[in-house]
């Protein structure tokens, strides 16, 4: 159908996309394209990463801002850092 699989971080930010034509209609196959190892796929699913099949208009609305750095999502790396307790808070 010419859609796109988009790979979405737990923060909601889109981190990758692949043509539906190249991987097929199954989310599992699209996930394999981004994450070849099954153990890594399980870990990502547990962390809240997900894949969605979207059309061209939705791709432009949801994925393009992320790829061009114009979205308002928290950075996935940045969020992991802010979860760390600062030493000052304990004293
Ligand atoms: Zn984003």
Image (spheres, helix red, strand yellow):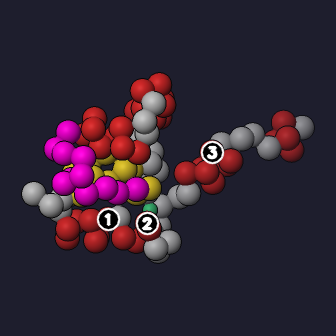
* Figure check: 83 above or below 65: above
Q: Does the magenta stretch include residue 71?
A: no
Residue 54 placed where, x, y %? 21, 57
Does the Cβ of the disc 2 residue fall within 8 Å of ligand 1? yes
Q: Residue at x 46, y 73 (%)?
A: 68
Q: Residue at x 35, y 64 (%)?
A: 63
Label 3 sits on a secondary structure element that is helix
Q: Are marks 1 and 2 in contact (CB under 8 Å)?
A: yes
Q: Is residue 46 among what the camera can see?
A: no
Callout 3: 10 Å neighbours few (<14), some, many (20+)?
A: few
Label 1 sits on a secondary structure element that is helix
Front one among 40 and 9: 40
* Figure quadrant of the N terminus: bottom left
Front one among 22 and 57: 22
Q: Are marks 3 and 2 in contact (CB under 8 Å)?
A: no
Residue 33 placed where, x, y %? 36, 44
Distance (Cα) linking label 3 and label 2: 18 Å
Q: Residue at x 43, y 39 (%)?
A: 35
Would residue 17 appear left or right of 80 to someone viewing this image? Answer: left
Name the residue beneath numbered marker 2: 66
Distance (Cα) linking label 3 and label 1: 22 Å
Name the residue beneath numbered marker 3: 80
Would residue 45 appear left or right of 26 to someone viewing this image? Answer: right
Front one among 56 and 38: 38
Which range of residues does the magenta coloring cover?
16-26
Name the residue beneath numbered marker 1: 62
């Amino acid at each position: 159908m010419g859609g796109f699989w988009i790979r979405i971080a737990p923060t909601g930010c889109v981190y990758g996309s692949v043509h539906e034509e190249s991987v097929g209609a199954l989310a599992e196959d699209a996930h394999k394209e981004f994450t070849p190892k099954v153990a890594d796929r399980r870990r990502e699913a547990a962390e809240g990463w997900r894949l969605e099949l979207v059309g061209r208009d939705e791709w432009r609305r949801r994925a393009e801002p992320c790829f061009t750095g114009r979205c308002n999502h928290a950075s996935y790396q940045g969020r992991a850092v802010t979860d760390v307790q600062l030493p000052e808070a304990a004293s």
